[in-house]
Image (cartoon, rainbow, N blue to C red):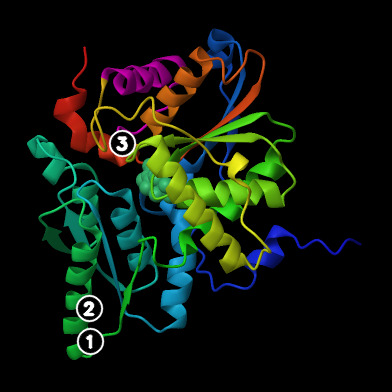
Amino acid sequence: MTSKKTIDQYLGQFSRAKLMTGSTPLEPLNRLSELLDIDLWIKRDDLTGLGMGGNKTRQLEFYFGEAVEQNADTVLITGAVQSNFVRSAAAAAALLGMKSVLQLEERVSGMGEAYYRSGNVLLAKLLGAEHMSFPEGENEAGADNALHERADQLRAEGRSPYIIHLGLGHPPLGALGYVAGAGELAGQLDDFDVAVVPSGSGSTHGGFLTGLRLAGVSADVFGICVRRDQDQQSQRMRVVLDKLAGLLGLEQGLPDEDIITWDGALAPGYGRIGDFTRDALTMMARTEGVFLDPVYTAKTFAGLLGLLKEGRIKPGQKVVMVHTGGVPALFGYQEELDVA
Ligand SMILES: *Cc1c(COP(=O)(O)O)cnc(C)c1O
C-alpha cells in the first residue's frame, strides 16, 4: 500500500450530483491517423449524455452538488448567447427538479438570426429556463452583478437561489470534473505522448492536466486558446492551477513547464469562424463522420493540425484530442457555416 491518494479520494471531499450517464468512449481515428501520420484518438466528451452532452456535464456535477447541499431551488448562470454551459445547466436543473435562470451576454457581434434563435438558445427554451440578456460580453463584474440582483429578487420571493460562479475569483469547482475526466481517460489508454484540449475558462484544461499528473501520466497537454491570446491564457492557467491545487489540498500547483497554450487558431476571435476553423471542422466530418463545434472543438482540431505543421506534435506520436462537445451550437452558426 502506498500513501499516495487516488483521484477518487481527492474528489471524495466534495459534494457531487450524478449527471453523467457513465464513462465516455475513447475512439481511434484511423483514417485521420493515416492521413496525418500520427496515432490519433478522440475522447468523446460530446457524448456525456445529459441534455445533448459536452464538457459542462462533468463540471456541473460539482456545482449542482453544492446547490443540492444548500437546498437551492433555482440555479442562475451567465454566458455567451450560444453557451453550452447555460444549456447544460438548464438540463441539469430540469433533471434535479430545480428552476434555472440563464443570462445571455453579447460576446459575439455581427451574427445572423440563427445565432439568437437556434442551437443552444432553442434547447434552453425547451428546457423551461428563464432567460435574461446582458448587453456586454467582456464585463464579468457587471454580468455578475446583474445575476446577483436577480438572485436577490428571487430570495425576496421566498425562493432559494444558487449562482454558478465561473469567474477567476471563485473556487474552480468545475475543474474537479476534469480531474475525474482525466482519471477516466488514464484508465482507458496507457502511454500517450500528447493531449490536445480547448482552453477557455481553463476549467477543462486545468482539471485535465492536474488529473493526468495525479494519475501519473506525463504527456504534454496543449491548451488551444479559444478566447484569449496565449500569454493571457497562460497567466490565467497559472491562477486556475493554483486555485485548483488549493481546493484539492495539494501542496502546490503544477509547475509552469506544464502550462502549454497555443493561439494559432484563435483568429478572428471568440466565437468567430476563420478559414482554418471551418476547414478543420469539415475535415473531421468528412474523414471520420464526427461533428465538431464552431466555437471550441473545431479550433482545437485546427490547433492540433497547426502544432503538427510546426513540428511540436511529431510523426508517430500517440495523440488524444478531447472532444468537449458543443455540437448544438452548429445550428446557431448556420449562416456562417453554409459551405459548399
Ligand atoms: C465551455 C466549453 C469549452 C471550454 O471549456 P473551459 O472549461 O471553459 O475551458 C470547450 N468546449 C466546449 C464545447 C465548451 O462548451
Upstream in sequence: badge 2 or badge 3: 2
Estimate the spatial distance between the alpha carbons at disc 2 and disc 3, rounded to whole Å: 29 Å
Q: Residues within 10 Å of mark 2 (few under 14, many from 20)?
A: many
Question: Percent from the top left, x then y, of residue 333?
Answer: 20, 33
Kind of residue at badge 3: Val
SS label for mark 1: helix
Ligand 1's image quarter is top left
The one of 27 and 107 positioned closer to us in this rendering: 107
Q: Is residue 129 visible?
A: no
Name the quadrant containing residue 43.
top right
- Report the residue marked by disc 2: 151
Magenta part of the chain: 275-295
How would you rate the neighbour count of disc 1 (Cα within 10 Å): few for under 14, some for 14-19, many for 20 or more?
A: few
- In the image, is 78 to the left or to the right of 48? left
Q: Which residue is mark 1?
A: 155
- The residue tagged 3 is 295
